[in-house]
Structure formats: C-alpha cells, structure tokens
Amino acid sequence: MPHALLLKYPGTNCDVETARALNAAGFSTQVQPIATATPAHVAKAQLVVFSGGFSYGDYVMSGRLAQLETERFLGDALHKHFADGGFLFGICNGFQILTKLGILPKASLIWNKSERFECMWDKLVKVSPTSPYTTYLPQEFELPSAHAEGRLVCEPGDAQKYLESGCVALQYADNHNGSELRIAGLQDPSGRAMGLMPHPERFLKPRHHYDPDWSGDPDWGWGYYFFKGAFDALK
Amino acid sequence: MATLTFEVFSRFQSATDANKLLYTPIEDALTYNHTRLYTVECEGDVEAAKDYMRRVLVDSISQKVQEDGTPALEGELFCISYGIKKGALDLEKEAILANYRGRTGLPFSISALTITQKVYIFGEGNREALSARFCKDVCNPAIHTWSVK
C-alpha cells in the first residue's frame, strides 16, 4: 500500500481533512510535525504532502519559515525523495511551501489582487494532460478556495514558458486573485510534484458541494480524484 | 558589532486607496503603500549574515530590498513606522530567531532583531491631523510603539 507522509507545521490547519482524503484514496498516512520529522520519515513515503493552513502565521511571507525549517530538519531529503521518483503534493499553504523549496518551477504566491483573504468556490480548467493527480478529473470542475496569498507571479516570460512546456496543471476559469495566465496549479515536467491553491480535500464527498443537488459524481467530490490519481499512479 | 537594515517591499503592489486602513473613510484622496524594515545587530562575518538574512526575508521574484538605510519609498505625505512594544511577544521575530538558533556553524551571531512595519501615505492634506487619524486606526497602543515622519 503506498505510504503518504503529511508534514505538519505550527499553523497548519488542514492536516486532518487531508489525511482523511489520503486514507479514502487508499494511502496509509502519517501526519508528522516538522520538529520531529527526519529523513527516515521521508524515505518511508512514496508521497509527501504539504497541506493547507497558515504555517508560522505566514510571518515574513507565506511558506518562507516552513521552507527554512523544512531545510533545517530534513536537509536534502525531499530533493532526494523527488530525484528517486517520489511524489510531492502541496495544497494552498503547501503549494506556497513547495514553490519555495525549489521543487516546482520557479514562481511565487503573493497577496491577492484584492489584497484581501478570499473564500469562494473556483471553477478550474485542467491544462496538463500528463498529471497523475488530475487523470480522473473532467476538463472543467470546481473546488473550494480560501487564501490571501494566492496570486501566482513569475519572472518575466516564465509563466508562458510553463504553459508551453506542460508545467501548468490547472488554470482558473475566473481569475479572482490575479494570477499570471490564470495559473491555479503548477507541476514539474514529470507531473510527480504538483501544487495548487484550491483545496481538493474540502470536496471529498458530493455533500461537501454548495449545491445540495450537485450531480457531477454519485460517490465522490472532485477533490477525491486528486488523491485517487496519485494513489493509482503509485500502487 | 554591525547594524544591518533590510527594508522589504513588493515589486507588484502599488499604492492603493488609503481608506482601506481606516475604520471610517475620509474625504481626502490619499493612497498608501507599505514595507517591512528588519534591523539586525550582528557580529562576525557580516557578508554571511547579510546572505542569511536575504534568504530569510526576501523573495527575489516578488520583492525588492533596500539595504542602505534610506527609505524604500519616497514622495509620501508622512510615514508611520510601528512595531511590537519592547517586552511584548513578537511572534515573527521569535520565528526568525528560532530558525537562526537552530542552525549550527554559522560564521556570525545575531544579538538583536527589530521588525518595523512602515506605512507610507501619499497625497495632500493636513499632515498633523491625518497622521493622528491613521495612527489611531493602524496602531494598537496595547502592543505597538510608533513614530511618524
């Protein structure tokens, strides 16, 4: 059974729901506080997950202190895990951490264009045909979003390069936070590392949808299929 | 002992409606922008200390940093500088210092870190009255000290 390691930081607040989603997809899941995490924990996992929240209170900038503490406690273990074929998945604050760890294409997530925290459902468009995380998803689907620092920015010209090279996994249909090229999710060229701002773990069951009559899928919400896709690619 | 300053500001955020800072809007057409000023007292290899602090504080894609001690922004009507009172818990400072203390073998030592938030107000109006109004709504006397320039 594929094993998932979910790293938890002071301020992480979506670890329970994310662990539940991983377990529902079939993973054995270990939630590990970063202060007691070791390279041995990473070595045991096929998938390393960074869930949503406000790690270290988003001090300095979102994800920065989590990145520094991850490097302090785990050294190059995550880069080794990735080089050895492992998967990494970052959701919301986890996406912000993954971008800073240098595993995803170079980008940064800054304050929304509105300069406010925004909580809403986002319509998303699947862009990359190669992502294992989005294999089972329809071309367009919805997920809940909740973030203040979700506006993706890149060095000049990089966003277009990412789009052309298949590194853009998801785009917003309605770009409320002002991200470059409407990018909602990025992946590395192999697709094994992916980060996105919306929260798949918050749409695990059809009853989680805002419309009680939602009929997109009889058994699962769209969020489930991110975890299921990763599980099936790893089993 | 060397004193280093890092005033960090966004490449993407431009001045915006200053009424966002106030509980009740004012008629004056003012805008604001904000930066964060980190002041570090250190000893040892100063260049290594600068490199470490830049890595901690600055995102090269989305931010710029001013390190010469001059204000990062100019042309303001006034600027409010505020920070956590001495003796009150500054969680951001503690989180940065915890990372620093957890690293072994650094060729420098940090003896003090002060974090100041700077709010630059742009436009025209009565500087004294307006700055008092903004300080009242931006700063919290229970936890902050502040100055206006």
Image (cartoon, rainbow, N blue to C red):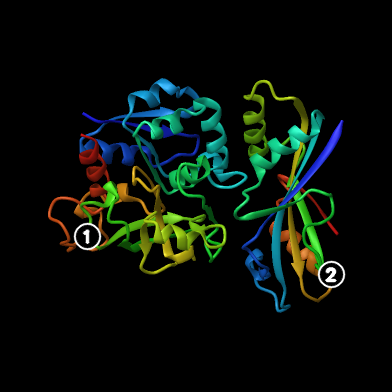
Answer left or right for A50 relative to B127.
left
Secondary structure at numbered mark 1: loop
Q: Say if labels 1 and 2 share a chain.
A: no
What residue does disc 2 label? Answer: B127
Q: Is residue B134 above or below residue A43?
A: below
Neighbour tally class for label 1: few under 14, some 14-19, many 20 plus, Cα within 10 Å: few
Neighbour tally class for label 2: few under 14, some 14-19, many 20 plus, Cα within 10 Å: some
Q: Is residue B103 above or below residue B144?
A: above
Residue depicted at 33% across the width and 62% down the height? A124
Image quarter where the N terminus of chain B lies is: top right
Residue A215 at x, y = what percent?
15, 62
Q: Amino acid at mark 2?
A: Arg
What residue does disc 1 label? Answer: A138
Residue depicted at 75% across the width and 66% down the height? B121
Quarter-wise, where is residue B27 in the image?
Answer: bottom right
Mark 1 → mark 2, Cα distance in angstroms: 57 Å
Residue A77 at x, y = what percent?
45, 27
Residue B87's disc number = none
Label 1: chain letter: A
Q: Amino acid at mark 1?
A: Pro
Please name whichever residue, A157 or B45, is drawn nearer the observer in this view of the structure: A157
Quarter-wise, where is residue A41 in the image?
Answer: top left
Count of labels shown?
2
Image quarter where the C terminus of chain B lies is: bottom right
Residue A138 at x, y = what percent?
22, 60
